[in-house]
């Protein structure tokens, strides 16, 4: 069973709240066998819903799902195909539907020695990106690869385990390759610096000149989420949650040099913001 701290982190990434009281209740040493029993979900549901609301009830089920996920991974860690088939069968992986962060990925970041602060940022970006992606799907019916959004966002700052300098994109992609992560994720690490550099910007920053364009909507969603998470949590600008940050996005970038950087970078972020807001039906 994953330690409670992981449940708190994934709850934050999904809902913005840690649901600490709920996870402590589920893991109560005297009761945890009962409270992890799938056949008893129906008995506990009314009590949990009354206390923590429908979102809390969902977090309860997510807690059990994450535990199953981690147990399956342990049991069938080496036989990935069998494991994935079983996870799909029980709705634990939800391929092709929604996507929830994989505990094994979070462990990869921890094992890469990512700091708690950077991991927290990564979880927040993943949660925000998945939220935006779901709204894009419901607002426009556009097909979005939710797994790429979730995993790409979770890993975008992997390179920060080694350096916080501008090279963290490049380094992250190398680390991702060494870890065997898919190239679709490695290029996100490489391209996320300032939301996709032009050749002139790459030269100016001393980075290799190549195509940093964010060709995929999934990539643009992640970069938009990354920018929003900084705005929401840096404390540099006073914002009232995600909706407020989205609403005032252009104003904030126009007024805060840290977020706007320069005309080219700012216009690029505006492009993602306008495109994605339109897809969400705003
Ligand atoms: Fe970054
Ligand atoms: Fe980031």
Image (cartoon, rainbow, N blue to C red):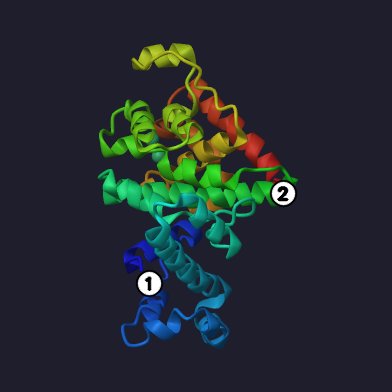
SS type, badge 2: helix
* Residue at 37%, 13% in the rendered image: 204
Query: Foreground: 128 or 103?
Result: 103
Residue 54 picture quarter: bottom right
Quick check: 66 above or below 37? above
Precedes in sequence: disc 1 or disc 2: 1
* Residue at 61%, 43% in the rendered image: 145
The answer to whether residue 216 is seen in the rendering is yes
Query: Foreground: 190 or 147?
Result: 147
Quick check: 70 above or below 264? below
Label 1 crowd bin: few (<14), some (14–19), many (20+), radius 10 Å: some
Picture quarter with ligand 1? top left
Q: Left or right of 198: which side holds 27?
A: left
* Extreme-right residue of the structure: 141
Q: Quadrant of the C terminus?
A: top right
What residue would you read off at disc 1? Answer: 20
What residue would you read off at disc 2? Answer: 139
Q: Percent position (x, y) of residue 91?
A: 59, 63
Q: Percent position (x, y) of residue 138?
A: 71, 52
Residues under labels 1 and 2: Cα distance?
32 Å
Label 2 crowd bin: few (<14), some (14–19), many (20+), radius 10 Å: some
């Amino acid at each position: 069973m994953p330690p409670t701290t992981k449940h708190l982190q994934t709850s934050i990434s999904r809902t913005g709240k840690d649901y600490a009281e709920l996870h402590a209740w589920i893991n109560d040493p005297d009761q945890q066998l009962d409270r992890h029993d799938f056949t008893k979900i129906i008995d506990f549901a009314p009590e949990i819903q009354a206390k923590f609301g429908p979102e809390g009830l969902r977090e309860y089920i997510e807690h059990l799902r994450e535990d199953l996920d981690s147990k399956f991974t342990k049991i069938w860690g080496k036989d990935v195909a069998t494991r994935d088939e079983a996870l799909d069968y029980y709705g634990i992986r939800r391929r092709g539907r929604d996507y929830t962060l994989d505990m094994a990925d979070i462990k990869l970041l921890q094992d890469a020695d990512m700091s708690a602060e950077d991991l927290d940022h990564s979880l927040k970006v993943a949660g925000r990106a998945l939220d935006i992606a779901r709204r894009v799907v419901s607002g426009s019916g556009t097909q979005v690869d939710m797994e790429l959004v979730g995993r790409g966002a979770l890993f975008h700052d992997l390179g920060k385990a080694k350096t916080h300098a501008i090279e963290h994109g490049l380094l992250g992609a190398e680390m991702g390759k060494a870890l065997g992560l898919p190239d679709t994720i490695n290029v996100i690490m490489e391209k996320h610096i300032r939301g996709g550099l032009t050749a002139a910007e790459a030269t100016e920053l001393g980075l290799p000149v190549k195509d940093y364009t964010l060709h995929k909507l999934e990539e643009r969603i992640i970069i938009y989420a990354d920018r929003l998470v900084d705005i929401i949590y840096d404390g540099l600008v006073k914002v009232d949650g995600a909706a407020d940050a989205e609403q005032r996005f252009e104003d904030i970038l126009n007024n805060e040099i840290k977020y706007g950087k320069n005309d080219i970078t700012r216009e690029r972020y505006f492009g993602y913001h306008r495109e994605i807001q339109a897809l969400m039906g705003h």
